[in-house]
Amino acid sequence: MVLLGDKEYFKGIGEIKFEGKESDNPLAYKFYNPAQVVAGKTMREHFKFAMAYWHTLCGTGGDPFGPGTKQFPWSVASDARKAAEDKADAAFEFITKMGFDYYCFHDFDLIDEADTLAESEKRIHSIVEYLKAKQNASGVKLLWGTSNCFSNPRYMNGAASNPDFDVLARAGAQVKIALDATMALGGENYVFWGGREGYMSLLNTNMKLEQDNIGRFLNMAKDYARGQGFTGTFFIEPKPMEPTKHQYDFDAATSINSIREYGLQDDFKLNIEVNHATLAQHTFQHELQVAANAGMLGSIDANRGDYQNGWDTDQFPNNVLETTEAMLVFLKSGGLQGGGVNFDAKTRRNSTDLEDIFLAHIGGADTFARALLVADAVIQNSAYEGLLQKRYASFASGKGAEFAAGKLALKDLYDHAVANGEPQQISGKQEMFENILNQYS
Ligand code: XLS
Ligand code: NI
Ligand code: NI
């Protein structure tokens, strides 16, 4: 089914509407009701759902054992500019039919990279003009842009962490062009995911120099964009491994340390991805909480991994209980600072119908919406908050409160312990907390 010249790619699929949980229509939202107010904000404002250009329009399902399986009707033109326009048409048709307000891209998701830097820059500029018109016509906005400094073989030894200055400078040029494109499109944020910023073997690696170079590189990118008037937030997206064995931005805590070490804490926050958290042997909610504690919970890449293997499988979210634990952190920390929820997720290799892309995003949005509703009900109506407070009540009065206010010395702890004897055993009540989540979901 090739629709050359025909601008509707997703035929037979209209606007996806909220129909509620009783609806049997697979192409309707059961829980995501954009206008519904939860904890003082509409769902639409809470989430700022975004489509990821790379998975949704570029990824045809190839894996190490076989080629792509999906024939996208927008990927048939041989001319780069025409192919990019078709892809943009499909992108905006999809985003608007989903009722989403945002999208995210890597530079060369938009249009194929050319043989030279100059020609690549020209191509990006020309497609940016086209996208600008599409944004204006639809009201769809750019949540964040980024540059792909990991696919091209020139980056096999890294981009900003490359041992060769020429490659580092080449990456700098690419980031400048991607920043220009992001700013021209009114992008609200800019992401750095260091796919090849890491190493495979310490034997051939000067880790200190590589990390210092990344710090200098990020500062230069930030200074350039600020100099051009960019007021958005920069996000680091942590991931422990894949493609490199040791990625420098391993997890939220590691990345926050780097951000502070490089002096970037006023401009940078984190973009937390579910499957990256689990690859780092953390939970998603743990990573959100670490980011929130540092005031750096910026944005979310929504997906999920697979518990039976250790890859970045980028499946769509569908686990309500787990997402509810994440939404508890989300609500209690006041939501995302500047970012939104980007579906960095792909349909399976054998999900080959165009309709599957809609079903997947509907499922992802419904999972987040349902989890938000449950988390809100738990906070508002259940014993949860009270139980949590009670667990730490010893710091709210007496000596505990004095300690929390920084008024005690070690000798005071000694005196308190001597006076009070062996502390009572107090249960952590984990099962009771878990039962509350189950009860409200
Ligand atoms: C890969 C990352 C990537 C970033 C953007 O694992 O998730 O898709 O989000 O470069
Ligand atoms: Ni991501
Ligand atoms: Ni990822």
Image (tube, rainbow, N blue to C red):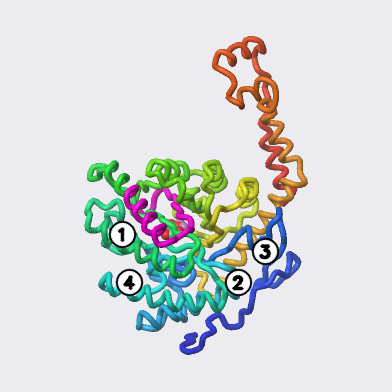
Label 2 sits on residue: 98
Q: Which residues are magenta?
A: 214-243
Magenta region includes residue 287: no
Q: Nearer the viewer, mark 4 or mark 2?
A: 4
Q: Amino acid at mark 3?
A: Tyr
Label 2: which secondary element:
helix
Ligand 3: quadrant of the figure: bottom left
Q: Which mark is residue 121?
A: 4
Percent across and percent down for residue 86 are 45, 81
Residue contact between numbered discs 3 and 2, judged by CB atoms under 8 Å: no
Label 3 sits on residue: 32
Label 1 – label 4 distance at C-alpha: 13 Å
**Foreground residue among 106 and 56:** 106
Q: Determine crowd level at label 4: few under 14, some 14-19, many 20+ residues with C-alpha closer than 10 A.
A: some
Q: Nearer the viewer, mark 4 or mark 3?
A: 4
Label 1: which secondary element:
helix
- At horizontal 25% and vertical 72% (from top left) the residue drawn is 116
